[in-house]
Image (tube, rainbow, N blue to C red):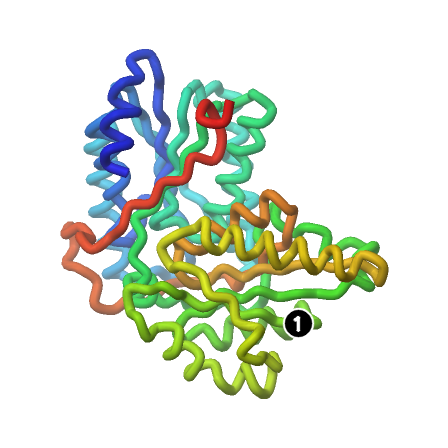
């Protein structure tokens, strides 16, 4: 990706690049921003602060350090504070970020040839609606024609950042699919949960809410830890045997650092089930991307292309262990680039 940024953004003399990134505590918050700032001739940034009640003091300090660095990198910047939860702890983050983006568009703030969405430190509830918004603008030729999604991928770091789950399941804003429509009441429900350590309570809430007919867990393989998939199977053995009724043939393996691997797997599974159940009420597919962020982007791509439902449990806060010292970047990250819309497809 470094080579792409150097050759592509540096050569666009008349182009204007917009970066949308999180000014959060994640050590990866500034990695993509540094690449864009170093190579783009004309660049500005929209920096998102995800606001949650009672944040951890250390994580808040880390977020302030990262935000200060991003502001230094991009003299032309705008900071958006997005309330993820309302006063009743209802999930409103996706709707709030889209509302703010629509206001910026009315003010002609998106006069860019390229938008780069850095999903490294954005939550699913914010990043998924945000990416979809710019894809729809590009399709209607009403916004930046080139939509890039980039991420500094480190699955082991994803495991170290533990969400403090809210009390209920939510559908990601703009990703309900057809599952809540009356016409889908008789459809066979397939659930594709992406597994991660310590997420049993979150997945149990989703399972009890959507009551799927079949469950196909998603496991990371290949992985930086060759035994990671086996360790997750051992951790979720009770769910597999007693709750989800999963057999060995029901497991879906996807490369933890390659979004296209999970993207192709989800499309293949969904399309096959659609044909099988076409005469008996149809089929719906529900995805829960709570594991590797890079692989989760594959779930987003499939959900957008096939209008699938995406469910998750929003975090009211985070706890994190063994993070690098404040201000020290994450050096063990793979930089992933997805060019989802624009000149490359014409």
Q: Nearer the viewer, residue 23 or 303?
A: 303
Res 57 → quadrant: bottom left
Res 38 → quadrant: top left
Q: Nearer the viewer, residue 246 or 203?
A: 246
Q: Is residue 178 left or right of residue 325?
A: right
Residue 150 in the image: x percent, y percent? 36, 41
Say if 162 sits above or below 14 in the image: below
Which residue is located at x 44 percent, y 61 percent?
254
Which residue is located at x 66 percent, y 65 percent?
190
Q: Is residue 78 left or right of residue 96?
A: left
Q: Is residue 24 left or right of residue 184?
A: left
Question: Secondary structure beneath disc 1?
Answer: strand
Q: Is residue 182 left or right of residue 175?
A: right
Res 288 → quadrant: bottom right
Which residue is located at x 44 percent, y 26 percent?
344
Residue 239 in the image: x percent, y percent? 54, 82
Say if 202 sits above or below 98 in the image: below
Local packing at callout 1 (Cα closer than 10 Å; few below 14, some 14-19, many 20+) is some
Q: What is the count of numbered marks?
A: 1
Which residue is located at x 72 percent, y 52 percent?
178
Q: Nearer the viewer, residue 104 or 129?
A: 129
Residue 302 in the image: x percent, y percent? 56, 49
Say if 76 sits above or below 276 in the image: above
Mark 1 highlights which residue? Answer: 214
Quarter of the image where the N terminus is located: top left
Residue 35 in the image: x percent, y percent? 23, 35
């Amino acid at each position: 990706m470094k080579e792409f940024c150097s050759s592509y953004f540096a050569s666009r003399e008349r182009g204007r690049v917009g970066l949308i990134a999180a000014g959060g505590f994640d050590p990866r918050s500034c990695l993509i921003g540094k690449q864009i700032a170093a190579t783009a001739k004309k660049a500005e940034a929209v920096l998102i602060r995800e606001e949650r009640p009672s944040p951890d003091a250390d994580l808040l300090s880390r977020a302030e350090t990262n935000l200060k660095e991003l502001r230094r990198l991009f003299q032309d910047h705008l900071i958006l504070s997005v309330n993820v939860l309302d006063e009743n702890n209802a999930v409103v983050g996706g709707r709030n970020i889209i509302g703010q983006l629509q206001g910026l568009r009315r003010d002609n703030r998106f006069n860019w040839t390229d938008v780069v969405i850095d999903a490294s430190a954005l939550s699913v509830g914010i990043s998924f609606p945000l990416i979809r918004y710019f894809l729809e603008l590009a399709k209607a030729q009403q916004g930046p024609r080139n939509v890039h999604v980039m991420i500094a991928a480190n699955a082991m770091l994803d495991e170290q950042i533990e969400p403090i789950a809210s009390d209920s399941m939510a559908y990601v804003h703009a990703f309900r699919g057809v599952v809540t429509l009356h016409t889908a009441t008789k459809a066979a429900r397939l659930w594709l949960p992406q597994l991660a350590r310590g997420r049993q309570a979150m997945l149990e809430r989703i399972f009890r809410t959507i009551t799927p007919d079949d469950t196909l867990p998603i496991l990371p393989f290949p992985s930086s830890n060759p035994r990671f998939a086996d360790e997750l199977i051992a951790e979720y053995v009770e769910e597999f045997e007693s709750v989800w009724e999963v057999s060995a043939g029901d497991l879906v393996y996807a490369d933890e650092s390659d979004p296209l691997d999970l993207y192709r797997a989800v499309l293949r599974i969904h399309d096959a089930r659609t044909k099988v159940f076409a005469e008996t009420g149809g089929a719906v597919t529900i995805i829960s991307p709570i594991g590797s962020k890079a692989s989760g982007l594959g779930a987003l791509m499939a959900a957008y292309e096939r209008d699938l439902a995406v469910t998750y449990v929003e975090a009211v806060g985070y706890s994190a262990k063994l993070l690098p010292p404040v201000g020290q970047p994450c050096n063990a990250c793979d930089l992933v680039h997805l060019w989802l819309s624009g000149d490359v497809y014409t």
